Image (tube, rainbow, N blue to C red):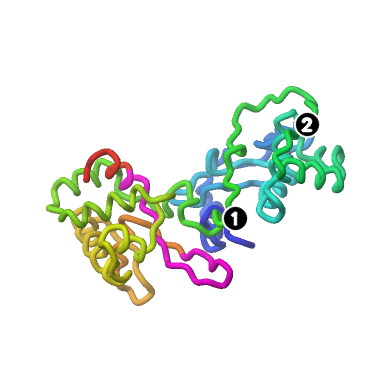
Amino acid sequence: MLSYNGYDSRWRNRILRAYHRGEAGPDFTLVGKVCALCGDPDRKATEWHSEDYSEPFLFEPPATYPMCSSCHGRLHKRFDQPVEHWQLFRLHVLGGGYGREFTKLYSKGERDRLAAGLATGEQIALPTIRPRLSTDDWWLDLSLDPESREAAWARPRPLRPRPDTGAFSRTIGALNLSDQDRRILRAHAAASRRSLGMQAIALAVLGGGTAQTANLIYGKLAKKLCQHLQWIPDRREDGSEIWMSVVAEGWQPSPIEGKRRDYEWVMVPSLAAAVEGGAV
Ligand SMILES: [Zn+2]
């Protein structure tokens, strides 16, 4: 199975093991639950969908939802076909439709035609089937960017907890950071999706230079923060510390048209909040 929301199968297996250890609690059951997307009262939820596999594991919304198989399938398929198909399904559910009714009401040819209309900016209105009861529209905001499957920025939370905003602010205040260090943190927090490669940081902050130079400077800064915070960093397979892990989570973007892209780091939200809150 492909990655989802920046989690690969290793992370899904971890939460599964936690579930088998009994960490989900007695309320984690599909008995009596309806689909958290369509709310179909006549077809009980049969599976779980997870948006968030980070630690500490959460077995309830907004991390995990009970779903019917129709909605769950559509949700994951949103990347496998033009996004308008998912948009069409959303319109169907917003009109009170249930997941299982979608393909019964709209044939493949009809869906293709409507989706093509949406793609060209046509206003498509689907008939209202019944009043919708659910008010939790978590599924309306799901990413349509296929990159969200692998990207660290798509995770609702970092894989494991980071120091909180207050701790980062106090540490930044206590350390005598150079102007260059401050510029790096500000550029990183301001980047789109807080995701930057070292080459981009070199360009934005050092006015050029290599990714290796930026890596060295940012790595030193991260080590200072990590040690002052007494946070235990991730480690490489050889056991060495990944000091950057206190400030960011790394991920490898897929090549575009065969062209390799730089490894990127996504600044953790608590540090970005400290930077944006004026700590730097
Ligand atoms: Zn459903």
Real-space Cα separation, disc 1 to disc 2, in angstroms: 26 Å
Asked if the beta carbon under badge 2 is closer than 8 A to the nearest atom of ligand 1, the reply is: no
Instruction: Report the residue that reaches farthest toward the bottom.
Output: 238
Residue 146 makes an appearance in the image: yes
The residue shown at (58%, 43%) is 142
Point out the stretch of residues depicted in magenta.
252-272
Indicate which disc residue 102 carries. Answer: none
Query: Residue 60 at x, y = what percent?
Result: 54, 40
The residue shown at (23%, 65%) is 217
Residue 90, picture quadrant: top right
Front in this rendered view, residue 3 or 91: 91
Residue 102, picture quadrant: top right
Using a 10 Å C-alpha cutoff, classify the residue at mark 2 as few (fewer than 14 neighbours), some (14 to 19) or many (20 or more).
Answer: some
Using a 10 Å C-alpha cutoff, classify the residue at mark 1 as few (fewer than 14 neighbours), some (14 to 19) or many (20 or more).
Answer: some
Query: Residue 14 at x, y = what percent?
Result: 51, 59
Query: Residue 279 at x, y = what percent?
Result: 22, 43
Which residue corresponds to mark 2? Answer: 126
Left or right of residue 110: residue 85: left
Indicate which disc residue 146 carries. Answer: 1
- Pick whichever of labels 1 and 2 is earlier in the sequence: 2
158 versus 274 height, above or below:
below
Which secondary structure lies at badge 1? helix
Front in this rendered view, residue 279 or 99: 279
